[in-house]
Amino acid sequence: MPELSEGLLETYMAHFDLNRKQVVEQKAAFDFLDQDGNGSLTFEEVKAMNAKLDTPMTTEELSVQFKELDVNSDGRIEFKEFLKVYVLGAFGRNVCVANMRDSMPPDVIPPSPKPKKHSALDAIEEDKPFEMKLSAKNNVGFYVRAARRILKGSEDASPVAKMRISALGNSINTAVAVAVRLGKDGLAEINKVHTAYPDMSAGGEHSERGCAQISIDVVSSTS
């Protein structure tokens, strides 16, 4: 089974706002289903595992579940799609994975798609920056290391030209510190800063509270 490098592990932790244990546990579950070990799940693999269960789902039910996991509808489930559904179900967070790149063994790299006409909407999506969501779980140093790998790229992922550093509440100072540090290190320049104070549920049926948030768009200085 393809192993997660330290760089890719930290990328997943930062992008999905998960800790190390959560990512490792989900990778183990993914690898258990990935019978041929090529780094992605096919419907046949999921179907074969389902048949071994005491109370298996019907083919129709399994098909619906597979389509929900297959975010980009390419007929296979990648680990980032597996994590997306896990985070949505466990924490209620809908994390975008459209522009997230991860490793894929050379023998399973899909052929280059044929050129196609792009609409204005496609251009907007392609220009959307890679988003790194910060939380109080990790310190500035952790996010600086993660951002450095995302911007410069690694053996597991290509570099990105634009990145959005976002945070809520007590994590705002961390986001600012990370953006400033990237600038000092010559890795990126701050392009845009957006702040807001949206209402968020405080747990009661009708209670809401305002929570400050910040989004800092940076542009790679190495691209």
Image: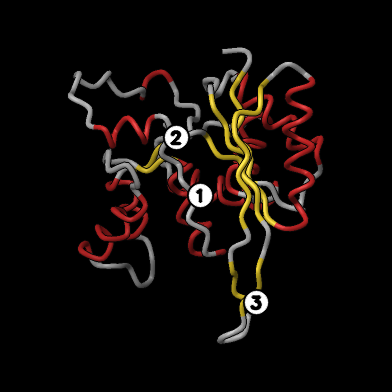
Say if mark 2 contacts mark 1, CB within 8 Å: no
Residue 223 versus residue 60 in the image, above or below:
above
> Residue 27 vs residue 63: left or right?
right
Residue depicted at x 75% and y 51%: 171
Say if mark 1 contacts mark 3, CB within 8 Å: no
> Residue 104 vs residue 52: left or right?
right
Residue depicted at x 64% and y 42%: 14
Q: CA distance from mark 3 to mark 2?
A: 30 Å
What residue is disc 2 on? 128
Q: How many marks?
A: 3
Report the disc number at residue 202. Answer: 3
> Residue 77 vs residue 173: left or right?
left
**Residue flagged by tag 3: what amino acid is it?**
Ala
In-front residue for pair 168/6:
168
Residue depicted at x 31% and y 24%: 110
Crowd around label 2: few <14 · some 14–19 · many ≥20 (10 Å): few
Which image quadrant is residue 124 in?
A: top left
Report the disc number at residue 83. Answer: 1
- Figure quadrant of the C terminus: top right
Label 3 vs 2, first from the N-terminus: 2
Q: Position of residue 203 (x, y in %)?
A: 63, 80
Which image quadrant is residue 51 in?
A: bottom left
Say if mark 3 contacts mark 2, CB within 8 Å: no
Residue 147 versus residue 25 in the image, above or below:
above
In-front residue for pair 41/83:
83
Q: Indicate the secondary structure of the residue bearing disc 3.
A: loop
> Residue 88 vs residue 200: left or right?
left
Residue depicted at x 69% and y 32%: 146
**Residue flagged by tag 1: what amino acid is it?**
Leu
Residue 203 versus residue 30 in the image, above or below:
below
